[in-house]
Image: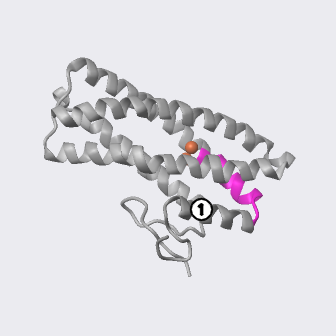
């Protein structure tokens, strides 16, 4: 039986399709980043109830859920590709190194957005200087994620799907479930 879970707002594929689940996470990254950019476009960054909710939900996503996605890739997927020691996956491993560097860059940008975001939520608006800084960081994240997600969705995941065994894919799915405190067979752990 396939268990469909909801990591974010839309029903996801099951843990028996771990690479599909990782792509579903990309759609959430795109949508929460777009939400942050929309809020940051408001003059003075002034928060009404709706913008406050959107800002708070997006910050929470990038603080709590997105790091699990990075761990899915860095701790479950990429090590299994490396372990294949197969000539055919060499281009994928080169891509993986690039992706890991992106993760570190994104993390630093998110940390800055998180720091400003905390002040933003507390004060309900932002001084011009901080608003300009946060818009710049969000634009940098947008550029980074656009290329990063395309590389993962179009090259890394299809390559991994072709190279990894069913057993490896199943193990990745189990680890993803555990990372979220879910028993892949159903129920919580
Ligand atoms: Fe990634
Ligand atoms: Fe990703």
Q: Is residue 37 above or below residue 69?
A: above
- State the extent of the magenta-drawn residues as a range: 152-165
Instruction: Report x, y in % for residue 75.
Output: 64, 49
Residue marked by disc 1: 18
Residue name at image x 76 percent, y 41 percent: 91
Q: Quadrant of the N terminus?
A: bottom right
Q: Position of residue 149 (x, y in %)?
A: 54, 43
Q: Horizontally, is 7 left or right of 14 in the view?
A: left
Judge from the rendering whether residue 81 lies leftward or rightward of residue 72; answer left or right.
right
Asked which quadrant contains residue 97, the reply is: top right
Residue 94 at least partly seen: yes
Scheme by which the image is coloured: one colour
**Residue at disc 1, secondary structure:** helix
Q: Is residue 41 visible?
A: no
Furthest residue to the bottom? Answer: 1
Q: Main secondary structure of the magenta part?
A: helix
């Amino acid at each position: 039986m396939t268990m469909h879970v909801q990591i974010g707002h839309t029903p996801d594929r099951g843990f028996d399709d771990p690479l599909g689940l990782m792509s579903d996470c990309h759609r959430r990254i795109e949508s929460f980043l777009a939400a942050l950019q929309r809020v940051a476009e408001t003059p003075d960054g002034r928060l009404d109830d709706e913008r406050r909710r959107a800002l708070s939900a997006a910050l929470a996503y990038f603080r709590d859920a997105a790091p699990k996605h990075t761990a899915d890739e860095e701790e479950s997927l990429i090590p299994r590709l490396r372990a294949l020691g197969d000539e055919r996956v060499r281009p994928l491993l080169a891509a993986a190194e690039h992706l890991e560097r992106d993760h570190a860059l994104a993390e630093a940008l998110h940390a800055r957005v998180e720091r400003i975001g905390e002040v933003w939520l507390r004060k309900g608006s932002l001084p011009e200087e901080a608003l300009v800084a946060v818009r710049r960081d969000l634009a940098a994240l947008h550029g980074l994620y656009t290329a990063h997600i395309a590389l993962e969705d179009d090259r890394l995941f299809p390559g991994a799907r072709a190279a990894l065994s069913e057993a490896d894919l199943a193990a990745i799915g189990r680890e993803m479930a555990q990372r979220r405190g879910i028993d892949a067979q159903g129920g919580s752990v």
